[in-house]
Image (cartoon, coloured by chain):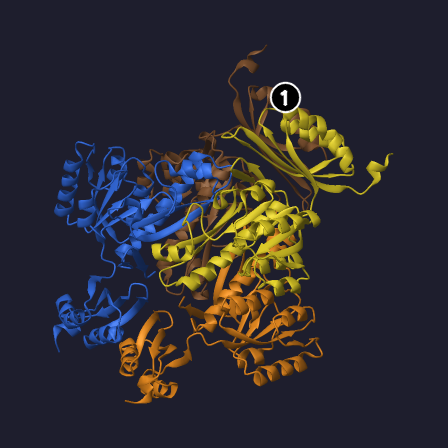
Chain colours: A blue, B yellow, C orange, D brown
């Protein structure tokens, strides 16, 4: 009897994607079963448009990470898989970026502390100092990194330094009112989540709630998405709406909009941290 | 004792709009009270953006229409009011226009017959004959008016003829896949309701659900609005959404979209027929 | 080369449940793969409360039903599985039972004809004759089976006769205002879906909307569930709500309630017919 | 010209209820107009069940409170009105009562500070000390008032003392897990709002989410209501739901439930503080 079979089992989560063809589930399930894994949750999806196959498996196994990875290696090679393996519930090292609006920051930190959001917020970056107090209340280091046209390159260098030094896995733009450079977006591809203060596609440009008011919409929405070079066009993770009517003025729309923004962003961060979001080109597969 | 006080009271609905200034409610309520009216429901709204005031009053009164109109005349003149006076629950003479998709037609006719939608559908116009059977089931005259580039002017003349001959008060484009001419839109301004198979603002052009699928949205929506020359840009009456996910293909999006379309259109038609929708420039005030 | 491999593949849907233990997914996926099956969709769930495991798999395979069943037999035996195997999209032979309210009947028949609801409604039973016209419009045989205290046993015998003669697989109580006997409920266990005109748990007894009005609720709901001996307590399949307010009178609550009832029932019927609903004791697992 | 007419106008909100009969709106609007008032928002409702009439008016007027009250006095007397007069946006002096669950407390304090919730939280009472830190972050005095069977009377005396000393107008039970005595409920009637961690009517007794899980519900809800002697049966102010499914375990239900609880409670507090909630027997009229 080896130690790997007597150890308490670990609850693993495996995600993978690859070109779709017969036998993937069988091979993956068989490989896991051969190592004593008990699949507790499994979802898959074949996208006819992209021809890609996506799978998320939770499996209890006493095998070590090295043993699982070694066992999966030939399957990964055979199917050309992109994959991740993590422990269920491990808190993802996260950096929050903010400007002046507190609603998303306060909500995410609250959920980390009180509602089991599986992130470990290792720092808060603000291009304004306004939200340092909220960070302090939650015992989070606050980094004031002002951004002007002249200092943008320096600011991004600082940001990259923080990402490296803090082993950041996820960056959340929690109403961060600056645009990241294309280079940074590319280097952090799939690791940066933004909350867009409107539906996508929707009102372009400044003051979307003023535009919504002017257009007389009956619903306002918010969209969380991965950041790509094209700021508001990255793969959508989650959207939701709130009902409004003619009597709502712009401050009310903003307030209602903030509620839906924080709700949508919190869901997106949770699903990402739980490895429920897989990239399918410029779309996402979300295994809720 | 005059006959006006002994008659059973009628339940009236009065709507009005005018430039906002003090005293409107007082004058209107006073005028109605002076004629024995008992206000059962009243809503008003002053739009700071347009400077306009809107009011909808339901009032029980034994006074005749002539008596009420005469009493209101000086108030209307003083404030420069646009107004309507109708009997609560009177069924609005309505013409439905359709192409091939049956969901909105079937739902509206069902609601007229079984759910008290206060319309009297006096005819159904189809540019295709496909939906004649549904019209027949509900005992509605079906007019097949094909539209080609060459016959468009004739078709609109036929339509105008029907509107006149049938005393049509409301035209509902229940997935009618033709664009009305600017002239017709202008002549029937505020009397034509369309259902748009998407959010506004949203995907422009053909096959919006295919676009939505391609974009990977997590919600699909529908919008009902008054028709203006700019087809998809008229004043919005109602919007709603349905949740979708990566696993929904285009037929499923279409099916879910049809559910939300028929629901949104039915609400808009009901509110219009109940005189709950007032035009405020390119927006609406909806007294739900 | 055998004919089974050259035939066009069939799209199968397999559901199963059994006591949870390691290796189920592996065995099932392996068995399907060994017969050239390509899994296109798969969901599973292990219920820690009941200790049961549930799985739904869609698989493309050119193998015959007999071949698949033979291949699964040892797996089924080993794990003690309850299972079903069907062709994706096959229309389930369905009997609708109604009284006087038309909304659910009209909606289900509409969805069968126009929206791909995968049922084949082989008949409509009404304890009142009122809805014969709707059935006729959709070319469905209508059976008027009155029920009085004295004739209830006869009526159920008639119903059983229809179920047998028409090879009925699913009975939908589409606002059927009679209670089925315990015997019948037991004999048709898992094959009868009801729509309850309220939330569960909720207002017991007659006129739930009057009770809801009296209680001043701000939401009304509907619940679809499998029928067991205890009429309103069977396993819940789907629930939804509609917002109401103080101004809604009982007829309006009824009308809004009918909208949510027909929506909830249509979803339950679709999911059942697509084999997405699995029984887990007095609960359901719904693989949407 | 008196000073009262040259002062900048105040934005007043007047609510009233009385037995319904003709002329109320006219009299009220007329009285306000006679004092230079410009009605900016007005809603009314006559309840056929209770025979009561309800009205909420926002009016801009340069008249003093004394002048308005004096003008209204004869109308109030004539119709037997219950009424309130307040300044729009005035922050209502509010006492929050909590136990250990932080979600409602944190959300309400956040909304007071950042989202214009029109309350002035003058203190937080906890029967446990756990939430003192959140109160401190928002600079709110925290009063630890433990409650045991033996000290309940003392605790309520302390609470009454705080209500008096702090001029408390509204008490919010923000997941306060103690039952107030009938005497206290009566003395503070219409001034205490509770959030119930479930739908009403719904699961009675302890651990409602465990009950919901056991029942297999597909939606969970929350209800905010005024407190009466019968804890969970007071007049409902607001309800909402969140969708759940078979895969949600009890902690997830609790977490999702907390989201809907805080949202529902925040709405109820806002509407109460804006004088949008009027009592109609054991129901409420909510002028949203």
Q: Outermost residue, front direction?
A: B150
Residue at point 43% right, 60% down?
B253
Q: Is residue C89 visible?
A: yes
Give how far across and how far down residue A59 sits, in percent. 25, 69
Give how far across and how far down residue D78 sits, in percent. 71, 29
Check the image and report above or below for B207 versus A256: below
Q: In which quarter of the image is residue B140?
A: bottom right
Q: In this view, does B214 lie to the left or right of C196?
A: left
Check the image and report above or below for B75 versus B66: above
Q: Where is mark 1, residue-wise?
A: D70
**Image quadrant containing the C terminus of chain C:** bottom left
Give how far across and how far down residue B27 sits, in percent. 67, 27
- Depth check, front residue: D229 or D79: D79
Q: Outermost residue, top direction?
A: D1
- Depth check, front residue: A161 or D139: A161
Residue at point 42% right, 68% down?
C286
Give how far across and how far down residue A179 sits, in percent. 25, 40
Helix, strand or loop status at disc 1? helix
Q: Quadrant of residue B141?
A: bottom right
**Image quadrant containing the N terminus of chain C:** bottom left
Residue at point 70% right, 49% down?
B165
Q: Can residue C53 be seen in this view?
A: no
Check the image and report above or below for C242 versus C190: above
Q: Outermost residue, right direction?
A: B1
User: Mark 1, chain letter?
Assistant: D
Q: In this view, does D269 lie to the left or right of C173?
A: left
- Depth check, front residue: A38 or C86: C86
Graded by Cα atoms within 10 Å as few (under 14), some (14 to 19) or many (20 or more), the crowding at tag 1 reads: few
Query: So how many labels did they put on this image?
Result: 1
Check the image and report above or below for C245 versus D138: below
């Amino acid at each position: 009897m080896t130690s790997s079979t007597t150890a308490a089992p670990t609850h693993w989560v495996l995600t993978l994607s690859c070109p779709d063809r017969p036998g993937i589930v069988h091979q993956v399930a068989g490989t896991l079963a051969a190592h004593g894994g008990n699949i507790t949750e499994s979802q898959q999806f074949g996208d006819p448009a992209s021809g890609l196959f996506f799978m998320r498996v939770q499996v209890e196994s006493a095998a070590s990470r090295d043993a699982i990875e070694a066992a999966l290696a030939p399957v990964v090679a055979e199917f050309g898989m992109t994959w991740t393996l993590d422990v269920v519930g491990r808190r993802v090292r996260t950096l929050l970026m903010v400007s002046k609006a507190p609603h998303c920051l306060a909500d995410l930190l609250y959920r980390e502390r009180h509602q089991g959001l599986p992130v470990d917020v290792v720092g808060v970056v603000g291009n304004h100092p306004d939200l340092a107090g909220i960070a302090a209340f939650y015992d989070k280091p606050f980094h004031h990194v002002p951004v002007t046209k002249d200092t943008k390159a320096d600011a991004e260098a600082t940001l990259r330094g923080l990402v490296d030094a803090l082993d950041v896995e996820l960056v959340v733009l929690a109403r961060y009112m600056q645009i990241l450079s294309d280079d940074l977006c590319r280097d952090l591809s799939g690791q940066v989540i933004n909350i867009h203060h409107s539906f996508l596609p929707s009102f372009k440009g400044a003051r979307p709630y003023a535009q919504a008011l002017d257009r007389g919409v009956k619903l306002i929405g918010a969209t969380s998405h991965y950041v790509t070079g094209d700021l508001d066009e990255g793969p959508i993770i989650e959207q939701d709406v709130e009902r409004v009517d003619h009597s709502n003025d712009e401050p009310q729309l903003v307030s209602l909009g903030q509620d839906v923004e924080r709700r949508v962003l919190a869901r997106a961060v949770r699903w990402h941290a739980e490895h429920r979001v897989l990239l399918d080109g410029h779309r996402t597969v979300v295994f809720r």
